Structures are given as structure tokens and as C-alpha cells.
Image: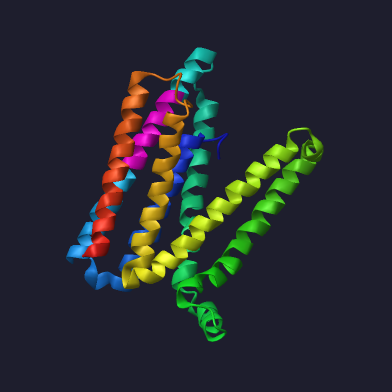
Amino acid sequence: MRKTSGLALGTAIVLGMNNALGSLLLLVLFHGEQLISRTGLTLITGVALMVAGVALCSWAGSIKKEVSAEEAGNLSSTDSKMRVRKGVLLAILSGAFGTMFNFAVVYGDRLRSPAERAGARPVNTNNVVWCVSLMGGFIVNSAYCGYFLTRNRNWSLFTARTSVRNSILSIVMRGTWKGGVAIYGMTVSKLERFGPSIGWALIQRTAIMARNAMGLITGDRRNTTNRFRCRMISGLLTLFGGIATVALSALG
């Protein structure tokens, strides 16, 4: 997807679809009567703000890419436009299927109930669901990476001098990400009936905001234009507004 639509655009589409389907679709399917209630309308408003924030961040990413292409003398052609269209299609499919992660929580009672009967605290029973749902992602990603490592003959990179440092960073990243998922599972159980809708919107958009904010703080966006920075900051502020609005819906 990165080679076809670009990381910024692809991420925006994937997470936009994730948010819309993972939050609003659950609200429609399980609490359709609450759509026009105070909580439902607040949640819809918050999700809309979040999607707008992602669009602004994506716009900023596309501006940065255009500037880089112009500096390299590599302007878009008919060929690259076709690649972008393919990338957008892949991003849409990825976003749609990515919501299954949240649906696993909603339909995971048959896994949570035995865990609770075995002595697990209710707040921790979603960890059983993660073991099953994340296994599917592990198999697919392992097969995908293994295929390209074999095709490109890159297995030797694991014995390079920097491999130990990179492996440690990967383990730390994985540990913090899984910790976030575990906390999300605990949070969903505390948010009662709107938990999956509200929690999913919050975790997705907070991740986007944190990633882009860290990019600005660490200087990853140093060699950029004022137009890029303006769009990115506007996107982050809009995301923050959406997160705050969704949080308010949890209080309604």
C-alpha cells in the first residue's frame, strides 16, 4: 500500500474506514434506536470530527509528498495514478476488514464466559479474545513477511550488527502496543453498552494524533513547508476535538 497510495493517504483511508465502520456500524447494528439520542448524536459528531482530522493530516502528507516529488524531479504520471487507485482500493479493503478486530470483542462472549468461570476477573476476560483474534493477524503477517524475505534473500539482515538493537526496539514496540490493546479491552468492559463504539473511536484517533505529534516533536517534519505544518496542526487540533467529543458521549 505504501508504494501505491503513499503511507499518509493509505493510513488516513484505513483508519477512517476503521473508525466509521468499527464505531458507527456497531452503533447502528446494536443500538440503532440510540442514533438520535444525545449519546448517539454526540458520538456521530465526534467520529465525523475525527474523520475530518484524519483527512487534514492526509492532505498534509500529500503536500509533503508532492514537494518531495518536485524536488526529485519525479512528477506523477498516468502510471503512478493507476498505482494510487490500486493503493486506495487496498486501503479501503484493509480498513473494512480491520474492523473485525473490534467485532471480535462484541461477539467474544463464548470465549469470555469460560474464562470467567475459570476464575478470570471480568475486566480481564477480553485478553482471551485477543489471543484468538490476533493469531489470525500473526499468521497472515508472518507469511507475508516470510515470502518477501525469501524472495529478496534478506534473511541475512537478522545477523547484521544492528539486528540486536532493532530486535529490542521491535519487542518494546510490540509490548507497548499489546499493553494498549489490553487496556482497551479493560476499558470496553467499563463503558457498558456503548463501550466498543466509543472505545474504538478513542483508541484509533489517539494513536493517529500521537504519531503525528511525535513526528512534529522529533523533527521528522523539519524540512517541510508552512502549508504542510498548517494542515498538520489543523488536523491534530480537529482530531483532539473529535476525541474530546467522543469522550463526552461516554458521559451522556
Work out whether 162 lies above or below 11: above
Residue at the farthest bottom position: 117
Work out whether 12 lies above or below 195: above
Work out whether 130 lies above or below 237: below
State whether residue 223 appears in this view: yes
Residue 251, given in percent of the width and then of the height, sits at 23, 63
- Residue at 35 percent across and 31 percent down: it is 232
Q: How was this image coloured?
A: rainbow
Residue 234, given in percent of the width and then of the height, sits at 29, 33
Residue 14 among magenta residues: no
> Which segment did they paint magenta?
52-64
Q: Quadrant of residue 24?
A: bottom left
- Residue at 60 percent across and 51 percent down: it is 174
Task: Give the tally of numbered discs.
Answer: 0
- Residue at 50 percent across and 62 percent down: it is 182
Residue 115, given in percent of the width and then of the height, sits at 55, 80
| Quarter placement of the N terminus | top right
Q: Quadrant of residue 214?
A: top left
- Residue at 33 percent across and 38 percent down: it is 236
- Along the line of sight, which residue is nearer the eye, 25 or 165? 165
Instruction: Tell me which secondary structure the magenta stretch mostly adopts.
Output: helix
**214 left or right, relative to 45:** right
**235 left or right, relative to 123:** left
| Quarter placement of the C terminus | bottom left
**1 left or right, relative to 171:** left
- Along the line of sight, which residue is nearer the eye, 106 or 85? 106
State whether residue 16 appears in this view: no
Residue 60, given in percent of the width and then of the height, sits at 38, 29
